[in-house]
Image (tube, helix red, strand yellow):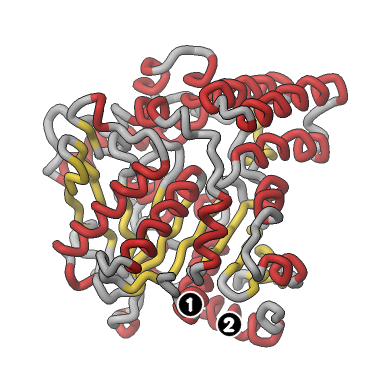
Amino acid sequence: MKSWAIVGLCAVLCRIVSCSTGAIDHSIVKSRGDFGYVEVRSGAHMFWWLEPFAGERSDINEDTPLVIWLQGGPGASGTGYGNFQEVGPYDVGWKPRKHSWVQKASILFVDNPVGTGFSYVENGTNFTHNNAEIAADLLTFLKKFLHKKTEYIDTPLHIVSESYGGKMAAGFARAIVDAQAREDLKLNFRGVALGDSWISPVDYVLAWTPFLKAWSLLEDAALSNVSQVALRTQQAVGNGNLTGATALWALLEETISNATDNVDWYNALLHNVDGEESSVWLTAALPENGVAASARRLLARYHNDALAEFMNGSVRKHVGIIPGNVSWGAQSAKVFDELSGDFMVDVVGVVDGLLESGVPVTVYSGQLDLICCTLGTDAWMDQLKWKGAADFKAASSQPFYVKGHRPQTAGFFKAHKNLAMYIVLNAGHMIPSDQPKAALQMLDHILHRQRRTEVSVA
């Protein structure tokens, strides 16, 4: 069975293009969102922020989807970075965002794992240490959220993620499917989307060398050194030395940064990005070398000074429920540290299981992303044992376009049964920030396609 026929794909995309650039009706945005806390375990408090659908009034009905957005890191805040710097209705400073995802769905941002953003733990024993614990917390959160917001029980629910959020999303989706099979959870789950996601760390580590070589960023002398560290990282994972593998990952990133004049891990066209380590608290919270330095380099972008000041100032005042001893992002570095033993564990098998269960899975990737580069994504997807994997691989990709003065290709799409993939051109790790029009169109396409696919709870 082949992917969509070209005619059908073009018809759908043309429909999407015609409505993907409409302005938000800000009269529908309910006083800048709804928010609250859920105690997922004793002493572990998860903060959420719901931005309701704000498209055309005529589009509001029982089929209006709800998207749960999971940020990466681990330790990056969805209610902060995802909401105010990527897909929410407002930018930093409450400035309206033209291509917000609330034009297509209600968006539920979650500060996950506990300790991220405005989420917090009461003592050091409450942090999560692996993906299974994260999934369990998210499942508890979802149950309690739906108990409070019963109007969303029958709403089409989609999980959309970015970076390490994709690893967490895969485990969360599995937990939802299992809970439905036990008849322990009632909801209208429609699928999961894994954006530039840390699904198979080793495959990304091994892909960095050929990626950087092809982009003329590594000369032969440095290439050999980088390759050796990458292979050592692979061996450490194979030997079960996961903490050692994370340390080697940090060494590899440091080696590559030194050899490439600090290539930007989120966009390979950039170097020495201003403000990458501007967050005062994050710089102070971690040492200057090893795993901590790599964590600081990756997380600082999500905690830039402008966002941190906005979240701990105007947003905190607007929300009005943040405990006095909680500061946005203050525990995020610890979140990463507590998960360092699980950081290099892959979840390819989890994605495989979701596909076999009939769950619609979408993978999307930015062409310019380095840390979760398309070479690494192709490598882990080639390992899928799902019965439709061969047909998916053989399917032809089709271009898609964003409405404008010039028919520039926005990216490529292909699908087979319940697996779909997008490559977004001229975009790095944060696709909604780099290519907001294409990202909004892609979201609309994902939501419509996943809702047409029958979801099993096997």
Residue sitting at x 43%, y 51%: 171
Q: Is residue 300 visible?
A: no
Q: Amino acid at mark 1?
A: His
Q: Amino acid at mark 2?
A: Val
Across and down, in percent, residue 359 comes to: 48, 68
Please identify the quarter of the rendering in which residue 382 is found: bottom right
Give the answer, above or below, for where 138 lies relative to 66.
above
Across and down, in percent, residue 63 comes to: 34, 80
Q: Which residue is mark 2?
A: 12
Residue sitting at x 17%, y 45%: 39
Across and down, in percent, residue 386 comes to: 62, 64
From the viewer's perspective, tell me whether residue 125 is left or right of residue 377: left
For disc 1, the neighbor class at 10 Å (few under 14, some 14 to 19, many from 20) is some
From the viewer's perspective, tell me whether residue 85 is left or right of residue 388: left
First of labels 2, 1 by sequence position:
2
Give the residue at the far right of this rendering.
220
From the viewer's perspective, tell me whether residue 106 is left or right of residue 225: left
Q: CA distance from mark 2 to mark 1?
A: 9 Å
Please identify the quarter of the rendering in which residue 180 is found: bottom left
Residue sitting at x 79%, y 38%: 210
> Is the C-beta separation of discs 2 and 1 under 8 Å?
yes
Q: Which residue is mark 1?
A: 448
